[in-house]
Amino acid sequence: MKRILITGAAGFLGSHLCDRFMAEGYHVVGMDNLLTGSLKNIEHLFKDANFDFYHHDVSKFVHVPGQLDFILHFASPASPIDYLKMPIQTLKVGSLGTHNLLGLARVKKSRILIASTSEVYGDPLVHPQVEEYWGNVNPVGPRGVYDEAKRFQEAITMAYHNAHGVETRIARIFNTYGPRMRIEDGRALPAFMSQTLRNEPLSIFGDGMQTRSFCYVDDLIEGIFRLLHSDYHLPVNIGNPAEITVKQLAMEILALVPGSTSELSYHDLPADDPKVRQPDVTRASEILGWEPKVERIDGLKRTLAYFKSVV
């Protein structure tokens, strides 16, 4: 039986990854300090003998006894509301945490995949974003703590690959949504859904014409699974190239709750907020044979059903 360590296991993406690898017959070791994750996301796994959980901060020394075939590093605050509130922890998990896990991968001879982000492209001057683009990031702006943590994460991962021969994979993840997103996540989609269900004003920052591209979580997990098992070590964009304005997204969600009395409410655009975001997924298609399959309207309906159960 293959054994895999998944950090950030109690988070949105981490918990779905735990489910997928358990279903594939792996022994899963989940690790999370529960800073932004919730045990509710993985409590259904505790009764399974092939699942272990470690309550631990990966910014501190990481020890996992026994064989480890794979490591997925998904530990990090990921929404602006979190990393603006916890800037030091965000920088530490991207730097010290990644260093610790790369060291563990070297000792265990494990293959490690790190969760990078589309935020490495910053407020892009190239559209759509291709992996060869180096980005347009303000390192001293409020978002820099997350953007630069992830850029450093990629750099040290490549250094371990080149200097120590560690088998590494880098996933640049674009906006992803689905069940288990936090209600108070702070990002547009969960905010719009919870506000619509509560008949509250939908908070739109700027004029709402900035664009995003939303990938349903099942598609994202499939892409991660394929990338981990591929032989490609350079960064790969994983996301849905279907681009939409933030205002369009708000209107689509409103249309799914016909009884809602919510209206749009406009606010100042935060500093360094990206104006556009759209992945070029040619590399994922050619190397992994992957492309997103879930249409946005179907994914929104599934996600809304989850939010109705928790709001």
Image (cartoon, grey):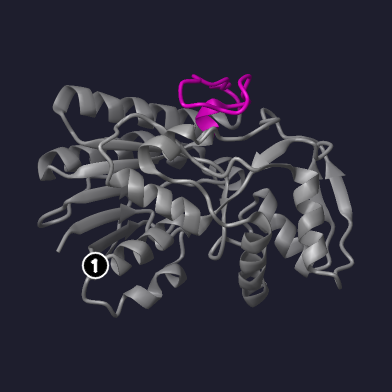
Residue range (magenta): 119-141
Q: How many marks?
A: 1
Tell me, yes or no, whether the highlighted magenta stretch contains residue 134.
Answer: yes
Kind of residue indicated by mark 1: Gly
Picture residue at 58% right of the left edge, 27% below the top: 122
Query: In the rendered image, which quarter is residue 49 located in?
Result: bottom left
Tell me, yes or no, whether the highlighted magenta stretch contains residue 24.
Answer: no
* 218, above or below 79, in the image: below
The answer to whether one can see residue 81 in this image is yes
* 107, above or below 235, in the image: below
Picture residue at 89% right of the left edge, 67% below the top: 261
Task: Return the residue at label 1.
Answer: 25
Residue 37 position within the rendered picture, expressed as x and y whole percent measured from the top left:
46, 59
Residue 242 position within the rendered picture, expressed as x and y whole percent measured from the top left:
64, 43
* 81, above or below 117, in the image: below
Picture residue at 38% right of the left edge, 58% below the top: 17
The answer to whether one can see residue 74 in this image is no
- Secondary structure type for disc 1: loop
